[in-house]
Amino acid sequence: MITVLYADAHVLVVEKPAGMLSVPGRGADKRDCLSLRVQQLHADALIVHRLDMATSGLMLMARGAEAQSRLGKAFAARQVHKRYQALVHGRLHADAEHWHAIDLPIAPDWPNRPLRIICAQTGKPSLSRWRSLAPLGNMTTRLELEPVTGRSHQLRVHLQAIGHPIVGDALYTLADAPPVADRLMLHATEIAFMHPVTGRAMQFTSTAAF
């Protein structure tokens, strides 16, 4: 079941459940995905960006090729702003007034694809911002996250790199991290953009279910 938060003649804003692909994968068992389900409701719906299969939350889609092109250019120019919430391992003191930066280059881990790694030699510049919303005991902390660049697995790799991987992350975790969740605790909570046709400022929010 896909929740459509907004629809007009040019754009759609939908919520992707955790565990669902954004687009079809290879093989018949990976055909089911958000894009095909939305196209059953709106045949002209086209993907503009993706969320990892394990991530839940807001996705922006275009209706038709012209809107897709305009939104794609807005993403490339960093004119689409996204925020996430995550639960991470370890305690980070609440400091909601201050944002912190993780500025580390990310590259494909070719022998272990689809994994990514931090690599100063071959990595592309990658910048994430985070702030602590609340430490939850001594085990986990809720963070608000903002990916300034848009590398694959960026938030997951960056948080692992600073020693606070996301709870439930099967790809990027600490060897001794306790299994405290059955899903990746990462949710796309906000998206803001200029409407590709009207130019109107659009902003949508979604509450994380964890």
Image: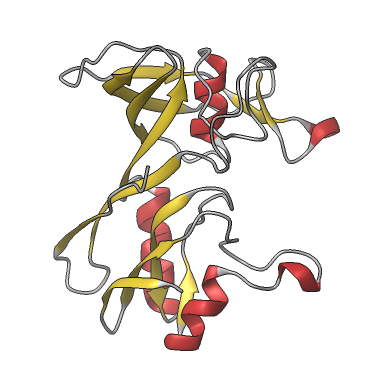
Q: Relative to 88, say whether 47 is above or below.
A: below
Q: Relative to 148, say whether 122 is above or below.
A: above
Query: Which of the two residues, 100 or 33, is positioned nearer the viewer here?
Result: 33
Residue 89 position in % (x across, y down): 48, 20
Query: In the rendered view of the protein, which quadrant contains the C terminus?
Result: top left
- Residue 193 quadrant: bottom left
Residue 25 position in % (x across, y down): 72, 64
Q: How many numbered badges does the structure rendering display?
A: 0
User: Residue at horizontal 44%, vertical 16%?
Assistant: 139
Q: Relative to 3, say whether 16 is above or below.
A: above
User: Residue at horizontal 50%, vertical 48%?
Assistant: 55
Query: Which of the two residues, 204 or 194, is positioned nearer the viewer here?
Result: 204
User: Residue at horizontal 63%, vertical 25%?
Assistant: 123
User: Residue at horizontal 60%, vertical 27%?
Assistant: 106
Q: Can residue 141 be seen in the rendering of this structure?
A: yes
Image side of residue 174 versus residue 183, left or right: right
Describe the colour scheme in one phrase. Answer: secondary structure
Image side of residue 147 versus residue 178, left or right: left
Residue 112 position in % (x across, y down): 81, 33
Query: Which of the two residues, 17 or 62, is positioned nearer the viewer here?
Result: 17
- Residue 133 quadrant: top left
Residue 80 position in % (x across, y down): 31, 50
Q: Can residue 79 be seen in the rendering of this structure?
A: no
- Residue 2 quadrant: bottom left
